[in-house]
Every structure is written in C-alpha cells, then in structure tokens.
C-alpha cells in the first residue's frame, strides 16, 4: 500500500496537545544536543581526543544512551522525534502531518542552537565540534554514508516502534533505536561524522559559524529518512496503515 501524506491544517496549532508536542520537541532536542555535543567536547578535551577509538566509542555510547532515554520520555507527547530526518521519514508515511512536521523541525533547530550556545558559555568559550568529512572522504561519499546511516535509523524506528504488527515489546523500541545510533556512529563517525540528524549538525555549525559541507548533513539524512519511510510503508506494512486524519496520531 502506498504511503498517504497528510498535509494538515493551521487549526492544529490551536490544540493544547499540539502546542505541548512542539514544546517537547524543542526540549528533547535541547537535551539530546547538550549531551551529544557535550560528549564530543569532553572527548576532545581529554587526552587522546575525539579522534581516537576510545573517544569515538565514548561519543557513540553517549548518543546511544541519550537517544534511548529521550525517545521513551517524549514518545507519549510528541512521538520523541528530536530529529528533522525522523520527522520527514514519518511524514512521508502519513504518520505526522506536513504542518506539524514544519513546526517540529523549527522547534528541533531552536533546541539545538540553544544547547550549543549554553555549552559554549559553560565551557568558557570552547568550540563546539561540527560534523565534518574524514580525511580522504569526498562530498559524494559522505552524502551516501549519511543516506545509508539515516536509512538504517528510520528503518529501525518503523520496524520497532511504528509498525502496528511489530514484535518488539512496548517501551523497548527506544532502546533499540539508541543502539542503532551508537552502532552507526562507530561505523560511520570516522568517515562522515555520522550525523543522521540535521538538528544535531545545525547547532554546532551555527554557534561556531562553520558551514563547510553542512549541506551534506541536511540532504543526506532527509533523503535517507524519507526513503526509509517510503520503502517500509510500501514493502513491509501490509494492509495495516490508516492515513492520518486526526491530530492525535501516535507521531
């Protein structure tokens, strides 16, 4: 069954639950970026730095843990996206309206920017590390890496959280998604930075005003997330998807 994209209406914004959901997306994004970027800053400051396998592992573990916890914390209010690629990936499957998606993404970017500004203040002006391509990695290779990594993230979200016929027990999906994020950072961090999240890349780039190859961390995740939504809905959900027609959908 082909995905059915729901446009939505500005009347959604008048509903208290909608306002709460947008606010929670800003808060979740703030907390995620604060922990994620903070772990990268800490790894870079300690002996050896983020570029070592120990530093990369520490960053991967920190992201995995905070993703698992925050998805569980925000699931019942906003769906626990805190990632424009997740929002877009769910929108193409009809699980969140385009109108809601637009405001979610704005909230996610705001939360990311505020987290990085606070980190810079708390660390005495220490630079927030931006996502960058590894040595010898070109723009095309980095773009494909981000597409594949984000595809695996969204595919996991659909399989463990969204799919009504999932075998995953309720509440376990967030942990599994966190594990995928950690594994992807270990697998792709040295090559593309393994962002998988435009908001995660946006905050550090804005605060440090470093935009080199920044487009990769938008185009790659959005393509990967959207593609995963289309593929899962088209080939793995069988006669169970109901197009979004109300504002209290689970995402």
Image: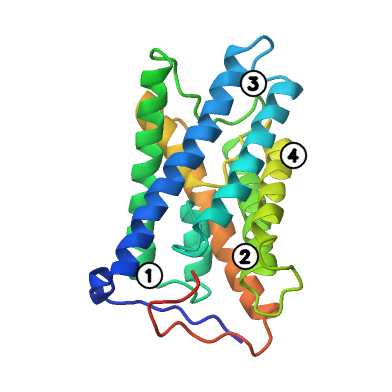
Residue positioned most to the bottom: 239
Colouring chosen for the image of the structure = rainbow
* Number of other residues with Cα within 10 Å of mark 1, as a class: few under 14, some 14 to 19, many 20 or more: many
Q: Nearer the viewer, residue 94 or 26?
A: 26
Which residue is the site of mark 3? 50
Residue displayed at 38% across by 61% down? 21
Measured as percent of width and height from the top left, residue 212 is found at 45, 30
Inter-mark Cα distance, 2 to 4: 19 Å
* Number of other residues with Cα within 10 Å of mark 4, as a class: few under 14, some 14 to 19, many 20 or more: some
Label at residue 187: 4
Measured as percent of width and height from the top left, residue 211 is found at 41, 31
Q: Nearer the viewer, residue 92 or 180?
A: 180
Quadrant in the rendering for residue 215: top left
Q: Relative to residue 148, is residue 238 depicted above or below? A: below
Q: Is residue 175 left or right of residue 20?
A: right
Determine the secondary structure under disc 3. loop
Determine the secondary structure under disc 2. helix
Inter-mark Cα distance, 4 to 1: 32 Å
Which residue is the site of mark 1? 98
Determine the secondary structure under disc 4. helix
Measured as percent of width and height from the top left, residue 74 is found at 49, 57
Q: Are marks 1 and 2 in contact (CB under 8 Å)?
A: no
Q: Relative to residue 74, is residue 54 depicted above or below? A: above
Which residue is the site of mark 2? 228
Inter-mark Cα distance, 3 to 1: 37 Å
């Amino acid at each position: 069954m082909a995905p059915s994209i729901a446009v939505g209406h500005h009347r959604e914004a008048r509903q208290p639950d909608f306002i709460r959901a947008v606010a929670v997306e800003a808060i979740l994004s703030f907390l995620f970026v604060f922990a994620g970027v903070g772990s990268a800053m800490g790894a870079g400051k300690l002996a050896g730095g983020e570029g070592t396998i120990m530093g990369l592992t520490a960053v991967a573990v920190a992201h995995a843990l905070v993703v698992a916890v925050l998805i569980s914390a925000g699931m019942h209010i906003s769906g626990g996206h805190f990632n424009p690629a997740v929002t877009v990936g769910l929108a193409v499957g009809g699980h969140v309206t385009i109108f809601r998606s637009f405001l979610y993404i704005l909230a996610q970017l705001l939360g990311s920017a505020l987290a990085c500004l606070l980190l810079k203040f708390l660390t005495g002006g220490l630079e927030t590390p931006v996502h960058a391509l590894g040595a010898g990695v070109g723009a095309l290779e980095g773009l494909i890496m981000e597409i594949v990594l984000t595809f695996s993230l969204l595919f996991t979200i659909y399989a463990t959280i969204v799919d009504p016929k999932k075998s995953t027990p309720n509440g376990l999906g967030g942990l599994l998604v966190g594990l995928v994020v950690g594994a992807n950072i270990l697998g792709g961090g040295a090559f593309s930075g393994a962002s998988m999240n435009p908001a995660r890349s946006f905050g550090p780039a804005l605060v440090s005003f470093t935009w080199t190859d920044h487009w990769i961390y938008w185009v790659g995740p959005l393509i990967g997330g959207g593609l995963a939504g289309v593929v899962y809905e088209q080939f793995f959900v069988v006669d169970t998807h109901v197009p979004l027609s109300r504002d209290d959908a689970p995402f």
